[in-house]
Image (cartoon, rainbow, N blue to C red):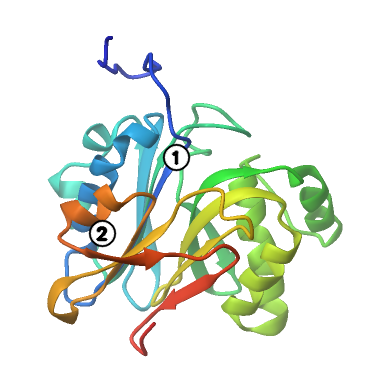
Amino acid sequence: MSTSILPGERPDRLEEECAVFGVFAPGEDVARMTCFGLQALQHRGQESAGIAVGDGETIMVSKDLGLVTQVFDESRLAALEGYVAVGHARYSTSGAAASWEAAQPHISAIDEILIALAHNGTLVNTNSLRARLIDEGIQLRAGTDSEVAAKAIGSVTQKTHHLREGIRYAMQYMEGAYAMVLASPDTLYAFRDPNGIRPLCIGKLPEGRGWVVSSETCGLDIVGAEYVRDVEPGEIVRFNKAGV
């Protein structure tokens, strides 16, 4: 069986529907760790790759079409400085196919604060959620369910001023199979649908250096993180300087 993958080519084997990866590790090179994690998870998606990093004040993102090693080189990684990161390798299941706009993480603004969302899975009620957001006057551009999820989270966060409440609200209305990691400038969130269909696990870096979230344990292994547990179905886990 051939396993070679050229740009734009689909492999002749099972694809696993996206990889998500997250790191909260002050003092570490979180962009490079995320790049390594995505390389270990490359079998889950070969269409595009992206990394977003928060430095406590804002979020920077770099993403493009292609494999992880085609998208990221030393200069691009060096430009992503911070201590919280989320990454994504995409295999499209809905929305726009091979396009930069559909590549993740998806960046969205909540007032003056940026968030970055990486999503594995498919929402089955995207159209009704999109209609609800449009009725609220929210503009949607990317045409993906990931954008809809980010905007739904942002809509409630603007009203409650608590990102955790925004995530909780969105999870009540999102239907489908999903595992998501979300970064604000200083915090990492990980959450799964109530049925726990898509995988998501938590790892701990040695000597208390930080935390890692990954679609599979191979993403933990490559950065030296020890598996702790899975994110439970319907659970939201938050990582920041106050703890877990």
Seen as rendered, the residue at the extreme right is: 135
Q: Please state which of residues 114 and 168 is positioned toward the viewer in this rendering.
A: 168
Q: Regarding mark 1 in the picture, which secondary structure is present there?
A: loop
User: Label 1 belongs to which residue?
Assistant: 18
Quadrant assignment for the N terminus = top left
- Which residue is found at the position 65% from the left and 72% from the top? 168
Residue at image coords 24%, 32%: 70
- Up-down relation of residue 43 to residue 244 (above or below): above
**Residue 79 shows in the view:** no
| In-image side of 210 versus 123 (left or right) | left
Q: Earlier in the sequence, mark 1 or mark 2?
A: 1
Q: CA distance from mark 1 to mark 2?
A: 22 Å
For mark 2, what is the residue? 80
Mark 2: which secondary structure?
loop
Quick check: marks 1 and 2 in contact, CB under 8 Å? Answer: no
Residue 152: horizontal and vertical position, in percent? 69, 61
Q: Residue furthest top?
A: 1
> How many residues crowd mark 2 within 10 Å: few (<14), some (14–19), many (20+)?
many
Image quadrant assignment for residue 227: bottom left
**Horizontal side, residue 96 vs residue 4: left or right:** right
